Amino acid sequence: MPSVVIAGAGPTGLALACGLRAAGVAVRVVDKAQGPSVTSRALGLQPRGSEVLDRLGALGDLPQRSVPIQQVITHVDGRPMARLKVGQRTKLVTRPGLLVSQAEIEARLRHRLAELGTEVEWGRELLAADHDGEGVTIRVTDGQVRADWLVGCDGAHSQVRKAAAIGFPGVAVIERFLLADVRVDLPFPRDAVSVWLRGDRMVSAFPLPGADLWRLMAPAADGLGEVLDADAVLGALSQALSEEAGLADVRVREVAWTSTFRIHRRLASTYRRGRILLGGDAAHIHSPIGGQGLNTGLGDAENLAWKLALVASGRAHEGLLDTYQTERRPIAEEVLASTSAMTRLVVGQTPLARAVRDRLFVPLMNRSLVQRLIWEKSSQLKISYRRGPLAGGTLAALPLPLPCPRTGDRVPDLECVRHDGSRTRLHAELGSRWAVLTPAAARTDILAAAHRHLGKANTAMLTTAARSAKVLLVRPDGHLAWSGTSPAALDRRLTRMLGTGRTG
């Protein structure tokens, strides 16, 4: 019997499957589609998203096949008013933001999953699921599957969420948008997202990999019907570019993809019901402005993977899974609130909102401090679980390149040395493993305590040049689990965290 069945082969489901397989958990991934999608849909990897893929061994050559974005150029009433610099290195952010098709990201994740011995089962739609104290009975199009756990990563219309009778309350935030990926020559910088604001209209152009490939986006006019063909979408977008950017002679050579969508804000009432869990768009949907959705789903997957792996292997009580919601749902709440506020501000649904946007918000984006704050927040590298149930609030007390992390904070990607003397970076050793990070000298006594709870194969020991006696235990997702010097203290912390007195 497979330990985990994952419904949905999008970025969240594939990332979760990779994390579980790397930890040795049996996984099946089912999807109702007949095969992989080849359209771009979501695009954009924030630094946190790239970091997650890197830890999973799935980043590959995506950075080389992506467009690194350095700025967002915002026009108001046809005039350039702000150049928001993004992608610059800071003490916190050392990776650029990348524009890359969701289809490319999924392909890299499928490749990594295949390396780990698992293929996606296409054409298998989940029809129903019933769970009990021992597992989940799942009915799919061609039969029935029994599993220990079921995770719904099957999008906004999740059948898993419906089968578990989990509510998905929310509201529509704004009217429909039109999208098209087209081959066209546009006189815009290829390292920039270009945005035009006029009244309550927003038009934008995103460069995609390929010398002449662009994504165009604009609100749907009131007169357009609910069902649009590609020609109607393209015509409306060409008209918007002509009116806002002054490009009357735009000649589109090829249309790769078109779509329409409504922005909604919805959040699942719970992320877990018994042996059924939710992740990604099945748990939360929000405005795409800011490029947070795909990256938030990847964060869900990574957080859940190490916890579910410990539970599935018998090293943790299933109560550990409750901390998945406790840590990740507040992140989704904040993303929903911030992206909704940003959407209302950018689109300017009221005269007051438009005045604030045009006279205050857009000009402020030229200030270096504001640019750094926006960039660091959107990077998702400031996400912390220090207020969650797994954090004790203690200081790490290590001279790291940032202010000392507390338990639950992300630990920077430090230079380290493996036990064999070879050099590496902290986050390269994570993904499916924990890291015992020791200053200067190895602490085999603390490593042994970690091995007793987490498993020898799941824990690596690394040393740093830090001038401190403190040892850090770093979670597979890069967050600090514990810091101290006593093996007995670590033993107590892991016993509480895992909800078991397991010692072997």
Image (cartoon, rainbow, N blue to C red):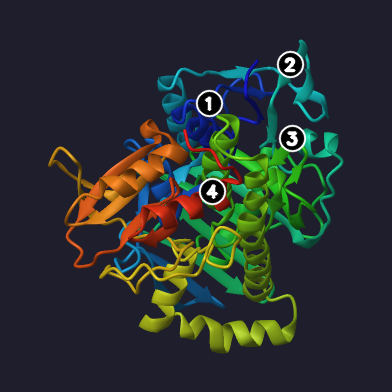
**Residue corresponding to mark 3:** 275
**Residue corresponding to mark 1:** 25
Q: Position of residue 287 (x, y in %)?
A: 66, 59
Q: Position of residue 163 (x, y in %)?
A: 84, 34
- Gap in angstroms between the C-alphas marked 2 and 4: 33 Å
- Gap in angstroms between the C-alphas marked 3 and 4: 22 Å
Q: Which mark is residue 145?
A: 2
For the residue marked with disc 2, what is the amino acid? Val
Give the quadrant of residue 97.
bottom left
Q: Earlier in the sequence, mark 3 or mark 2?
A: 2
**Residue corresponding to mark 4:** 495
Quarter containing the N terminus: top right
Confirm or deny contact between disc 2 and disc 4 (CB under 8 A). no
Q: Earlier in the sequence, mark 3 or mark 4?
A: 3
Question: Closer to us: mark 2 or mark 1?
Answer: 1
SS at badge 3: loop
In the image, is residue 265 above or below residue 252? below
Q: Earlier in the sequence, mark 1 or mark 4?
A: 1
- Gap in angstroms between the C-alphas marked 1 and 4: 22 Å
**Total numbered labels:** 4
**Looking at the image, which is closer to me, 431 or 337?**
431
SS at badge 4: helix
In the image, is residue 37 above or below residue 301? above
Q: Position of residue 407 (x, y in %)?
A: 46, 64
10 Å neighbourhood of mark 3: few (<14), some, or many (≥20)? many
User: Does residue 77 appear left or right of residue 407 in this picture?
Assistant: right
Name, please, the residue furthest toward the top. Answer: 142
Confirm or deny contact between disc 3 and disc 2 (CB under 8 A). no
Q: Earlier in the sequence, mark 2 or mark 1?
A: 1
Q: Position of residue 29 (x, y in %)?
A: 61, 24
> In the image, what residue occupies the spot 57% across and 52% down?
496
**Looking at the image, which is closer to me, 254 or 349?**
349
